[in-house]
Image: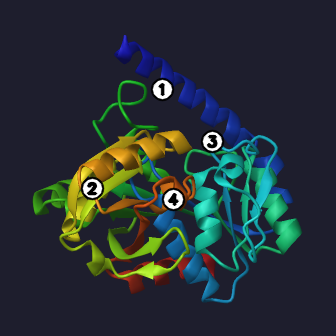
Amino acid sequence: MNLLESIYYCFYLKRRRRFEVLSHARVAPELSCKIISIGNITTGGTGKTPAVQWLAHLLQAQDKRVAVVARGYGGRLSQAGAIVSNGQQVLLNAADAGDEPVLHAKALPGVPVVIGRDRAAAVQMAVQQFGTEIVILDDGFQYWSLPRDLDVVLLDARRPFANGRLLPSGHLREPPLALRRADTLLLTRSDLATERQRATARANIEKITPAPLFEATHAPVALRDESNGSTVALKSLHSAPICAVSALADNEAFCTSLQACGAQVLMQVGRRDHHRWREAEVQYIAARARARGAEAIVTTEKDAVKMKADWVQPLPLWSLVIELRIADEAALQAFILNRLQV
């Protein structure tokens, strides 16, 4: 049945793309900004959030008016569309806007963040309200009805095509041949992959597309105390007994990162990506963690926007601050700026 469902999904995908591509002519003349899509071909787990923020900082450094546009998955205002941040202050919470847009809003001062299921309308809002020159489309590779100037596609170095099967039996949103539409590709979490995995990934991708391929890691750089926003040194994790709490496409990668920082993970709680944490649920987890001897609850930045520090008292709530580090970063920067003619 799963194979049959995947065949139906592939047929649906082709029809949807054909329909959306035909709408380009209606959308394109109305847009007066450049658009960069950061996306993937699998269901999450490639680290788009830090990539979006890296790109926003790069364009800010060129004195460009940048905005981030996202669907706002899980947010109550996704359907209607809304401004999450005006670049000066965060205007919505995760329940209204979704977790990732709120995280972008907090991490990117000076960068407006707009959500909307209709991404074209959200882009127009960004241009009209903020004079945006360049829009970063978060998770836009499959949003075919919106033209873009650059498509950046992220792939996990350990398993770039997941299990090789399309939804719903697998984790592929599109067949690997879709990578032919990409302008450049980024192999993420390359530090977690073996040399053989990286070489195999490169070889398989290069069979599909000649687009330039770069490698990146997601490096922990600090902790944030969610009670007051202060920075806690990463060395505080060394030998610390903690409870790891996350709701990601790859919860194991988060736990591995904490262990690589020297943390003693006494307890790990993982939920599905975009899980909406409830106060009673988090309090229960914290009570269990404390009973096991944990001295802190450590979560992701994305999950922290859906929690409150007082839910885990008397334990501290720390979020792990992640930074994208790209091998041959200067070459990727030059490629992007050249394509955008910035």
Q: Amino acid at mark 4?
A: Ala
Task: Indicate left or right for 165 with 309 as reference.
Answer: left
Query: Does any portion of residue 43 appear in the rendered image?
Result: no
Q: Position of residue 239 (x, y in %)?
A: 18, 70
Look at the picture and state if 240 lies above or below 158. Answer: below
Q: Where, quadrant-wise, is the N terminus in this rendering?
A: top left
State the residue at coordinates (37%, 61%).
298
Question: Closer to the N terminus: mark 2 or mark 4?
Answer: 2
Viewer-nearest of discs 4 and 1: 4
Q: CA distance from mark 2 to mark 1?
A: 34 Å
Q: Position of residue 195 (x, y in %)?
A: 12, 63
State the residue at coordinates (42%, 65%).
316
Q: CA distance from mark 1 to mark 3?
A: 25 Å
Q: Residues within 10 Å of mark 4 (few under 14, many from 20)?
A: many
Q: CA distance from mark 3 to mark 4?
A: 15 Å
Task: Indicate left or right for 62 with 184 as reference.
Answer: right
Question: Closer to the N terminus: mark 4 or mark 1?
Answer: 1
State the residue at coordinates (55%, 50%).
141
Q: CA distance from mark 4 to mark 1?
A: 36 Å
Question: Closer to the N terminus: mark 2 or mark 3?
Answer: 3
The residue that label 3 is drawn on is 74
Q: Amino acid at mark 1?
A: Cys
Q: Where, quadrant-wise, is the C terminus in this rendering?
A: bottom right
The residue that label 2 is drawn on is 255
Do the residues bearing badges 4 and 1 touch, measured as CB atoms within 8 Å? no
Q: CA distance from mark 2 to mark 3?
A: 24 Å
Viewer-nearest of discs 2 and 3: 2
Q: Secondary structure at mark 3?
A: loop
The residue that label 4 is drawn on is 304
Question: Closer to the N terminus: mark 2 or mark 1?
Answer: 1
The residue that label 1 is drawn on is 10
